[in-house]
Amino acid sequence: MKVLVIGGGGREHALVWKLAQSPGVKKVYCAPGNAGISGIAECIDIKADNIEALLDFVKYNWIDLTVVGPEIPLTAGVVDAFVKEGRRIFGPDKSGARLEGSKIFAKDFMLKYGIPTAEYKTFTSYRQAEEYVRLKGAPIVIKADGLAAGKGVIVAGTVDEARDALKMIMKDRAFGDAGNKVLVEQRLKGEEASFMILTDGKTVVPLAASQDHKRVFDGDSGPNTGGMGAYSPAPVVTESLRTEIMNTVITPVMKGLRRERINYRGVIYTGIMICDGKPYVLEFNVRFGDPEAQPVLSRLEGDFFELLKATAEGRLKDVTVSWKDDASVCVVLASKGYPGSYEKGKIITGLDSFKDDKNVVVFHAGTNLNNGETVTSGGRVLGVTATGKDIRTAKDNAYRAVEKIRFEGMHYRKDIADKAIKKQ
Ligand code: AMP
Ligand code: GLY
């Protein structure tokens, strides 16, 4: 079987890595891929949002399954275009992708189907939004409605900060049309967890829980990023919390999708805030989390290709999923300046150090090949991912590996997984 993975970040490296281990997979392509992916798959020079070129590639190369990594092609309708041409593809169609593509759609959906989430109000007028913020006071959360590469959410500590956020989104139009509407939301306090499921619209297969580290600096300080590291399992998601998430979040989501006649096939990622032991939904994503996919897929047993193919074909009930007892920790190495602006093209050394280490995989996120050398090409550059018998061992293995890697300006958090270790 031949597989195409769309995307070129750390998540896509993990998807390619896991798919390549399936016995039935003879060849993996990735569009556009990155330096790390090119070591295990053939990278194709097509951008992730060039749906027409992707479809042509799949037709002419007899691809059996396409797996979509990032959200942009999903919200742009890549699945609709492929299905129309009879092509097998993993991911939700445009109607399902609205759960991530419009935060207001997601919040209205949650309200309609009784899914616990923060109180909110929607605005198209700056003046009315500002008035509401003054009325409610801080802390308060401002969110651009549309996709904003993870930068459209501002947790404001003061009314002034909230006003600045509204100005940036609505007046300066920092995210273009994605900021035509904004959400003003109650701030929730608690611990976050990432809970992903696979569904073919009928059957739900929960994946192992994980936890991301959104802030750039240790101790959850500094601005939000795409994610500076993740681990799985997440002890904060106890057996009883997991049952509660399934009952109060996932079951109503599935009911809502059916009622709205959305035939959802793919991943549903729920960002959960646990407040006083109860789960509240912060956001839905319609794809695997990045960097959560790296530790989660490191722990997944069995045939990943069959799992994704069964999801795409609506046969998920035939498949069982199991997990390694080992824990997995992913530490993201970022470029100097990230999540702000950063330079590219820095030479990365030390990547060959782990070729024979079964516990360590270095997933590439923003890397390129330049005259045979691997260089940085993004804000998040690498996701050093290690397994171990428990989270502490996995963390030690990951940081031991990190020590061997160097590039100019490299920075990373030193406290990935500490929250879980403290709980043990
Ligand atoms: P989102 O993309 O909506 O998940 O928001 C990104 C991050 O902002 C989340 O992971 C949280 O850390 C934070 N956040 C979003 N909504 C809230 C909220 N209502 N209360 C507190 N923090 C939030
Ligand atoms: N790590 C959070 C996300 O993938 O959106």
Image: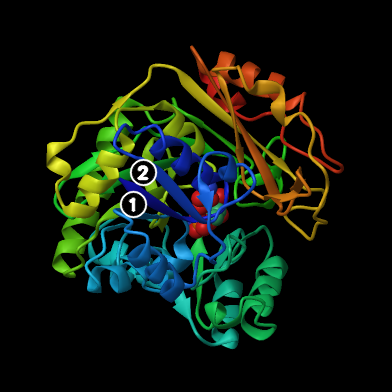
Q: Name the residue under label 2.
A: 196
Residue 129, image quadrant: bottom right
Residue 377, image quadrant: bottom right
Q: In this view, does 3 lie above or below 210?
A: below
Compare residues 61 and 262 and report the one nearer the observer: 61
Is residue 290 shown left or right of residue 337? left
The answer to whether the residues at label 1 and label 2 have Cβ atoms under 8 Å apart is yes
Q: Which amino acid does label 2 sit on?
A: Met
Q: Which residue is rendered at x = 64% and y = 42% of the image?
A: 228
Q: Which residue is rendered at x = 47% and y = 47% of the image?
A: 289
- Counting residues from the start of the chain, the first of labels 1 and 2 encountered is 2
Q: Which amino acid does label 1 sit on?
A: Ile
Secondary structure beneath dot 1 equals: strand
Compare residues 405 and 259 and report the one nearer the observer: 405
Residue 160 position, x and y percent, is 72, 69
Compare residues 420 and 98 and report the one nearer the observer: 98
> Callout 1 environment at 10 Å: few (<14), some (14 to 19), or many (20+)?
many
Kindly give the residue lying farthest to the front in the view shown: 60
Secondary structure beneath dot 2 equals: strand
Q: Distance between the residues labelled 1 and 2?
A: 6 Å
Respond yes or no on whether mark 1 lies under 8 Å from ligand 2: no
- Residue 344 — which label? none
Residue 119, image quadrant: bottom left
Please tell me how many numbered marks the rendered image carries. 2
Q: Mark 1 points at which residue?
A: 268
